[in-house]
Image: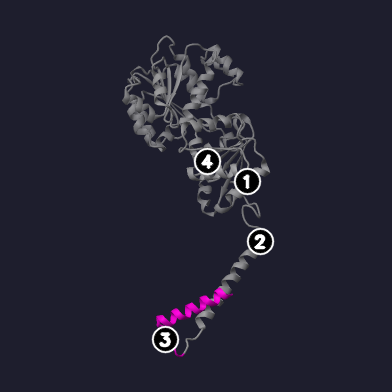
Amino acid sequence: MVDFLQLGIRKEINHTLKSLGIVAPTPIQEQTIPAVLEGKDVIAKAQTGTGKTLAFVLPILEKIDVHNSDVQVLILTPTRELALQISKEMKKMIENVEGINVLSVYGGQDVAHQLKKLKGAQHIVVATPGRLLDHIRRGTIDLSTIERIVIDEADQMLLMGFLPEVDDIISETFPSRQTMLFSATMPNEIRSLAKKYMVEPEFIEVKAKKVTVEEIKQVVIETTDRRKQATLFHLIEEHRPFLAIIFCRTKVRAKKLHEALIASGYESDELHGDLPQSKREKAMKRFREAKTQFLVATDVAARGLDVEGVTHVYNYDIPHDVESYVHRIGRTGRAGGDGVAFTLIDPKDMEFLRMIEKGIHQKLDIQVIKGISIPDREDYQRASEQIKEDKRSEGNRRDGRKAAPFSSNRKPHDKRSKGNSSNKTQGRRRTR
């Protein structure tokens, strides 16, 4: 079995890997590390959970010249959370290595603080496209010194509309740079970007390990939107998760559900785009330290979020594409641990469920919780009969009113007579 030393990773970093329990490279690492160390351009197609972050982080660290204070490496990510996560991963890897500096640059941070940091020696910059372009326009970062560039989660960049910004950023670097592109899927737009900026790239494809889906227990609960909250709380009380991520479709729904969890006495935080970056970072820190049990999030948290100890994922709202589903449920069952994913659906969600089943090549059983996710059958029948009876009674009352004959001395369109009649009726009602 090949180890990291044989792949060309220095002993100091190998020691750090072992201390973290990482002793053997994953397939994506085994194939990517040698190619990057040889200086080749690389296109890697791999899902989250395959170890792709270390696949580019480890060889990049081997190539840093600590005596050169220029920015040598740029890593582009679609979200702030992923930028922070990659930065932290890199800083962990260089605990036993002196002289390498890493800086994360993203929106929501204090610009003055970033400017101060950029004036120092920063060998590696991990950035989101928007804030990096802001620094380029300010003239506070020079990309002409970049020797290597990594585009991480390229397909997510496309979905979020960042490809034009990525294009502008790459054009600021010299063609002699080494380019690495990592993506879970390869749409035509991503292929065009690769063709434009890469030279004879080595294509590496690692199919998603079945563990990311099949070894996670997946449960679909049929309910209605009105009953979702009660159903979720019932599942929480029944299964008692250690740490859980709850995914909502919109920021408004995430906020509302978070508030309901807090009101019910649960330790909860929210994570979505409307929050200031400082609050997002605090929420992630508390969740990682298990100070909060639940993280209610939109899909901004689905990509690249890696937290140890997440035992449950709840899809409060079903995702509308297969990739998002796989990424969401992949937040649990990490590092060989057990994981459970619940997806709440109402009848109108059935088409998305069928699409997901087709995408993961797996049939998912649909369950109901009587009296919770759906009404108890007998209660439901009684309620239905009562509704029908109420409607019949209402119909009879209306028919009775329609059948009342006009007085022989009253004209149907006599407004004064109608008004007097109405007043008398109102008087009778008040008397009762």
Report the span colored magenta.
408-432
Separation of residues labelled 1 and 3 (CA atoms): 61 Å
> Observer-nearest residue: 103 or 280?
280
Marks 1, 3: nearer the viewer:
3
Q: Earlier in the sequence, mark 2 or mark 4?
A: 4
**Which residue position is annotated with label 1?**
233
Q: Quadrant of the C terminus?
A: bottom right
Separation of residues labelled 2 and 4 (CA atoms): 34 Å
Q: Is residue 60 above or below residue 256?
A: above
> Observer-nearest residue: 408 or 72?
408
**Which residue position is annotated with label 3?**
411
> Observer-nearest residue: 412 or 33?
412
Q: Which mark is residue 379?
A: 2
> Observer-nearest residue: 408 or 130?
408
**Which residue position is annotated with label 4?**
325
Q: Amino acid at mark 1?
A: Phe
Q: Amino acid at mark 2?
A: Asp
Residue at the spot x=62%, y=52% of the render?
A: 373
| Position in image of residue 33 (x %, y %) | 49, 20
Q: How many marks?
A: 4
Label 4 SS: helix
Instruction: Please rate how many residues cluster around mark 2, counting C-alpha atoms within 10 Å: few if below 14, some from 14 to 19, many from 20.
Output: few
| Position in image of residue 71 (x %, y %) | 39, 17
Label 3 SS: loop
| Position in image of residue 224 (x %, y %) | 56, 53
Separation of residues labelled 4 and 1 (CA atoms): 21 Å
Marks 4, 1: nearer the viewer:
1
